[in-house]
Amino acid sequence: QVELVESGGGLVQPGGSLKLSCVAHGSIFSFNRMGWYRQAPGKERELVARIESDGTAQYVDAVKGRFTISNNDAKDIVYLEMNNVKPDDTAVYYCYALVVLHMEYPYWGQGTQVTVSS
């Protein structure tokens, strides 16, 4: 049973920084992709950033140049470094991991709240 555990959320002022972490437990297969989604009140869950097993990263336009996604060497931890945060970044952030074998196996964390407010 794969479990994703997020940490690092909290309250931050506009223009500040925050770093989210997600540790994956229990997988016997390497993850093909890991990423972060977010869901703001009244809005649909959206992709924020994702990173492939080869290190290729993609970002939603709204966070390009401000957020950085990265992995540890073992590829079982994914980070999201958030800089110059804005009130629109307020949301619950969810960690995501994908194993691709003969089919896709997606896994989700429980979410961590990020609130950007002065």
Image: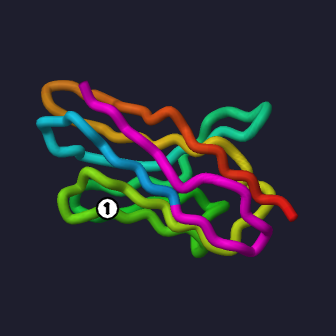
Whole-percent x, y for residue 68 in the image: 48, 68
Residue in the picture at 33% in, 33% down? 3
Is the N terminus in the top left, top right, bottom left or bottom right quadrant? top left
What residue sits right under mark 1 in the picture? 71
115 magenta-colored: no
17 magenta-colored: yes
Whole-percent x, y for residue 118 in the image: 87, 64
57 vs 89, left or right, is left
Nearer the observer, 49 or 115: 115
Whole-percent x, y for residue 62 in the image: 66, 61
Residue in the picture at 19% in, 36% down? 27
Nearer the observer, 96 or 21: 21
77 vs 40, left or right, is left
74 vs 40, left or right, is left
> Badge 1, how many Cα within 10 Å: few under 14, some, many 20+?
some
Whole-percent x, y for residue 48 in the image: 55, 52
Count of labels in the image: 1
- In the rendered image, the residue lying farthest to the right is 118
Q: Residue 1, relative to residue 68: is it above or below?
A: above
For the residue marked with disc 1, what is the amino acid?
Answer: Asn
The magenta segment is: 1-19
Q: Is mark 1 on a helix, strand or loop?
A: strand
Residue in the picture at 78% in, 67% down? 13
